[in-house]
Amino acid sequence: MEKLTYSLAIHDLARFTCGIADITALFHNLFEPGSSHYQQLAYELQREFKQGGSPQVTAIAFDRVSYNDQTHQGSFRIVLDINFTFGCEDVTTEQKAQTSEWTYAVDMHANTIHFYSSPFAESRSTADEF
């Protein structure tokens, strides 16, 4: 399981008291396509789906967002479109609406949010380097 950590502005932290729609909007803003945060998230998703060929994420959406205001933790599902390239066969296939389950924790004192990748994703090992 991998972890992504980002700093949040005070006004972003306030969104966690406003409801799920505001939290979902925050996630869409934080992971805006083309941003470095989006690229980091896409990389983690590509690692999770690498068994299907050489993956490239083409779209990301957030679904089933939940948040517990007592523990400051929550979960969400990422719905993604992904292309797989099989180099030896020179074939590319597109898979739409693939899903990945994630969790997150908000540290209100440090103004940070920690995202934890799907427990089903393989962690990186030194064997990946060979």
Image (tube, rainbow, N blue to C red):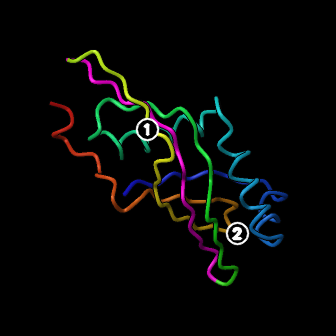
Span highlighted in magenta in the image? 71-88
Magenta segment, principal secondary structure?
A: strand
SS for callout 1:
strand
Judge by depth and name the residue closer to the eye, 79 or 4.
79
Q: State the residue position of label 1.
A: 95
Type of the residue with mark 1: Gln
**Circles 2, 1 touching at the beta carbon (< 8 Å):** no
- Along the line of sight, the residue nearer the viewer: 31 or 111: 31
User: As drawn, is 104 to the left or to the right of 95?
Assistant: right
Query: Is residue 79 inside the magenta stretch?
Result: yes
The picture places residue 85, in percent across and down from the top left corner, at: 33, 24
Mark toward the start of the polypeptide (2 vs 1):
1
Mark identifier at residue 42: none
> Would you say 16 lies left or right of 112 here?
right
**Mark 1 surroundings within 10 Å by alpha-carbon count, few (fewer than 14), some (14 through 19), many (20 or more):** some
User: Is 66 placed left or right of 53 in the picture?
Assistant: right
Q: Identify residue type, mark 2.
A: Met
Please rate how many residues cluster around mark 2, counting C-alpha atoms within 10 Å: few if below 14, some from 14 to 19, many from 20: some
Q: Is residue 119 above or below residue 130?
A: below
Residue drawn at the location 32% of the way across and 29% of the way down:
54
* Quadrant of the rendering where the N terminus is positioned: bottom left
Q: Residue at x 56, y 53 (%)?
A: 5
**Residue receiving disc 2:** 108
Q: Position of residue 82 (x, y in %)?
A: 46, 36
